[in-house]
Image (cartoon, grey):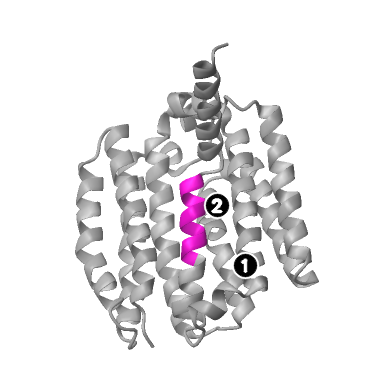
Amino acid sequence: MSVLDFNHRNLLKILSLFSLVRGYNIFVLIMAQYLTARYILAPQTSWSVLLIDFKFFAIVVASSLTSAAGYIINNFYDAAKDQINQPKKFILEHLISQKNQLILYLVLNMLAFVVASVISIKVVLFFLFYMLTIWVYSNTLKRLFWLSNIFSALLMILPFWAITLYFKNFEIIIFYHAAYLFFLILARDIIKDLKNFKGDWVHRYKTLPVIFDHITTKSIASLCVLFTFIPSYLIIQHPLGSIHYFFWTSIPFLSFVLIFLWRAQTEKAYLWTHNLIKFWILIGVLSIALTFR
């Protein structure tokens, strides 16, 4: 094997690992936790103090490791349907064998457990609960009607609950932000089921499109998007600085997403709709820095 072939294979393995643990999502999670802590949960704390806060750093690391492990186990159980829905992605991610995926899953969870244990027993218990819930979701709940979407959205929000508990900030505005994110992620997850209909149907996943039809599923996803307007309005009523522009803009942007959703008929169109919401979540994360209180 030439040096070029060796380097090419190693590069593919790195890309496979990055895709397997959803490296982009982990990066956004870390950024979102730090921005949320600095501008929403503990606005009185400066960056210089937050960045040297070891316990907070440990919670962020434990959240990232547990989430990465969760993506791996979710990918493991979804392998058969992903081979139908996303064949190219399936080939890339399975450059790492399923045996090695399980080993990596266990290693990441063990590392998360070790990191959490240096903080407190309460943090350990929280992340043990998080790990167990992810496994139950991937192994069982993901195949159940309707519950799969709700649990998926809740699992995405759980790392933010960890830092909320750390800062002990339970202001109502925090729950408005959580509600906005929950409904947006829920809508995205339902639209993802529309895109993955073929593989879900073949392997008997009881998703909304499989149980009902595309029209009903679009209606439910649309309702979830419309529900985001309620926390948006409530957040705008608070003096939070320029982040108001994000929530004002979200109304026309998400209205455009709904129009795009109802015009969508193909997997590619559903993927575009899914990615539009994913893009808006990223914009929302970046907009947290506009919060001033």
Image disc number at residue 178: none
Disc 2 on helix, strand or loop? helix
Q: Which residue is mark 1?
A: 57
Drawn side of residue 256 relative to residue 42, left or right: left
**Vertical side of 170 occupied by 187: above or below:** above
Badge 1 density bin: few <14, some 14–19, many ≥20, Cα 10 Å: some
In which quadrant of the rendered view does residue 74 lie? top right
Say if the magenta span includes residue 26. yes
Residue position marked by numbered label 2 in the rendering: 147
- In this rendering, would 166 be left or right of 83? right
- What amino acid does circle 2 point to? Leu
Foreground mark, 2 or 1? 1
First in residue order: circle 2 vs circle 1 = 1
- Considering depth in this image, is 59 or 102 the residue closer to the camera? 59
User: Which of the 4 image quarters holds residue 263?
Assistant: top left
Instruction: State the residue in front, 20 or 265.
Output: 20
Q: Residue at x 69, y 31 (%)?
A: 100
In 3D space, how far apart are the residues under numbered discs 2 and 1 (Cα atoms)?
A: 32 Å
> Which x, y percent locates residue 222?
31, 55
| Three-letter amino acid code at the position of disc 1 | Phe
Q: In the rendered view, does 96 fall on the left or right side of 190?
A: right
What's the magenta bit mostly, secondary-structure-wise? helix
Residue 274 in the image: state x and y as whole percent: 34, 46
Residue at image point 62% right, 75% down: 53
Residue at the far front in the pictured view = 3
- For label 2, count other residues whose C-alpha is less than 10 Å away and answer few (under 14), some (14-19) or many (20+): some
Question: Which range of residues does the magenta coloring cover?
Answer: 23-32
SS of the residue under disc 1? helix
